[in-house]
Amino acid sequence: MTNEDNLLNYLLRKGLTPSFSFPLQVANFIVEGKHIDRNGNWRRKVWASTSQDLKVALSEYTPGKVLMIDGVEYEVNGLHFSFPPNPVDRAKHVFEDGSLKYYTWCSTDGCGWVHKNVSSASTVGKCPICERAENINHSRYIEPEGFAPLIAPYRTDNEIINKPSNLRGPLQKAPLPRNNSSSGSTGKVEMPAPLLDEEDIDMQPVDKIHDYLGGDYELITMYSSPPSTIDKSGIELILVNSGYNKRGYFICQNCGRAEVEKPHELIKAEGHLRPYAISLPKSASDNQKALARDFCKGHPFREHEPDEGESPQWTPIMLGMVFHSDMISFRFKIQKPFKMDAELRNSKAFNGGLLAIKEALITELQSKMNYVNREIGGGIRKFAKQADSDSPREDYVDIFLFDQVSGGAGLVTSLKDSPEILPLILESVESRLSGDSCLDSKGCDRACIGCLLDFRNKGEHSLIHRKYGLSILSYLKGGDLLPSDEIDKEEIQTIAITMHDMYDDVEVNCIEKKGYFVLQIDFSGEQFFIRPISTLMNPKSDPLIELDDEYNKQWAADGLPRDKAFETVENLKNRQIFLLKLIRDTVNPSADLFS
Ligand SMILES: [Zn+2]
Ligand SMILES: [Zn+2]
Ligand SMILES: [Zn+2]
């Protein structure tokens, strides 16, 4: 890439040139060193450079990753800043001028809450979704302009100078990657989150879809972002690479060098290599020249200066961006027959099911509207209207879709103008979630490349759950979740077999009562029953518990009230031994637990 390309990218990024009147968000990867040119002069030399949409760069160029450009491997080891005010310490301005943004988020598994405000510190003390205070994180992030490898002085093409006395030698380039593969630990990009609050007045309901749905899907409300205007394009979304262990990266405040796991390369007394070679203007001061000859002596960022006698606490920094896009969302309220508690909202079953619906929607929308794969992104957002004196707390879920192109291109929102396509899309979503497109003709257990797994959702492969998606969709369509017997048939039978094999004197069988599965447990002449219920469902809404008077009267959560109990399938998997021990204890407290 030439300097002019660089400048153009920079201007586009900053929104100084019109590009649909909104800035493109592009990130470079640039290997900026030195060499001796044909005339024998020491010159700045860009050994390699490439660029990407910043959304993609946030996962593909992140510190620790190894990139291959023109057959050469480079390890990403720092941030690149275009046209820095300080030619020696290129990162310094970012840490001095308040460019660090705020990212307040909840780390409870499956919660996904993110605070709307990124420009100032938040005082939120408790997560409004999962109601836990200990999992609220107050992180900082940088929106990167670019990424770079380390640059080291070389004696010859292949001979690195390990202890240079002067870093401003004539030959400077990137050393070979330290971990010669990309398998090393790096970071992970979190699911994009719209920066909306509970009111979200920016999203407008699209009521007319119900004229086309023939009475189905009454429980869904569709929302759309308003058409773009000169001052405002769509909805703001945040995308963050949360770094190693969701903790961020250690980044040098002077040069922008980034370390993944530990800060110690950045706090060595002798200093460290920078992710660029320094080219000073002729007018540079003696002090600048001296600094440029030496290693960088900068330290990682820290939010708070240590008190006397305290060791410094470095503040790891995440990498992220806020982008605008057109967005639609399908919203529903969490109500009966769902279990209406935080356990449900954070459960793998609920979240895996929502992700499955999101993926099926993206695939079918792209296909029915002839869009290219990866033009549409999506995510899940949960929000709550907190209780007040007039009404109890209400919980909602948005399954949202947005245009991947910066600024939005009106792709997802065009659905609002063609509502007649929506029934076709939902029908195909249902068929896909039913297993009709799975590689296995019976339908896969959780997800497969036939139904839901795609390169675009590789970060979610272990989470997506087709059958729970089908259950939630069946609720949205007609009001009923699928009972455990339909989603978890094989799981329940497997649980019965493992429990049966646990103790010689305990018989466990999967039987049917009134057409529904029940685990029958025989021990010492007594009989117990456990009804496995759907993890998503309020027990009172389980079809057997509704039908069976005895169950209905005697039901009690958890534990085992003599002979009528229920457990969610998810809990049953983890509590098999506990339940059997409980039964043995109940019948015969003196029995040997380890027979
Ligand atoms: Zn939470
Ligand atoms: Zn540094
Ligand atoms: Zn499948």
Image (spheres, rainbow, N blue to C red):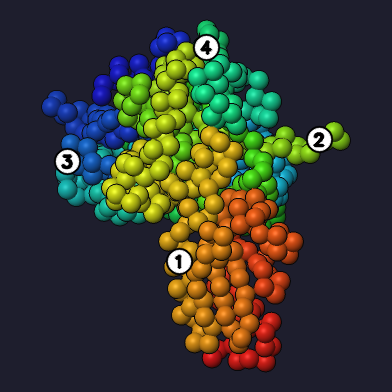
Name the mark on residue 391. 2
Q: Residue at x 45, y 42 (%)?
A: 356
Q: Indicate the position of residue 441 as horizontal and vertical percent values.
A: 29, 49
Which element is circle 4 on? Answer: loop
Q: Which amino acid lies under the numbered mark 3 shown in the image of this protein? A: Gly
Does dot 2 land on a helix, a strand or a loop? Answer: loop
Q: Which mark is residue 227?
A: 4
User: Looking at the picture, how far across and down is residue 206, in whole percent?
Assistant: 57, 18
Q: Counting other residues with Cα less than 10 Å from the Cα at mark 4, is it few (<14), some (14-19), or many (20 or more)?
A: few
138 sits to left or right of 320: right
CB of mark 3 within 8 Å of CB of mark 1?
A: no
Q: CA distance from mark 2 to mark 1?
A: 42 Å
What's the CA distance linking mark 4 and mark 3? 45 Å
Q: Residues within 10 Å of mark 2 (few under 14, many from 20)?
A: few
Q: Residue furthest right?
A: 389
Residue 570 position in % (x across, y down): 54, 60
> What distance separates the C-alpha of mark 4 from that of mark 1?
52 Å
Judged by depth in the image, the label closer to the viewer, 3 or 1, is 1
Q: Earlier in the sequence, mark 4 or mark 3?
A: 3
Give the residue at mark 3. Answer: 71
Task: Indicate whether 335 appears above or below 421.
Answer: below
Which of label 2 and label 3 is nearer to you? 2
Mark nearer the N terminus (2 vs 1): 2
Q: CA distance from mark 4 to mark 2?
A: 34 Å
Does residue 298 appear in the picture of this structure? no
Task: Assess disc 1: are there few (<14), some (14-19) or many (≥20) residues with their C-alpha within 10 Å of its C-alpha.
Answer: some
The residue nearer to you, when weighing 139 against 131, is: 131
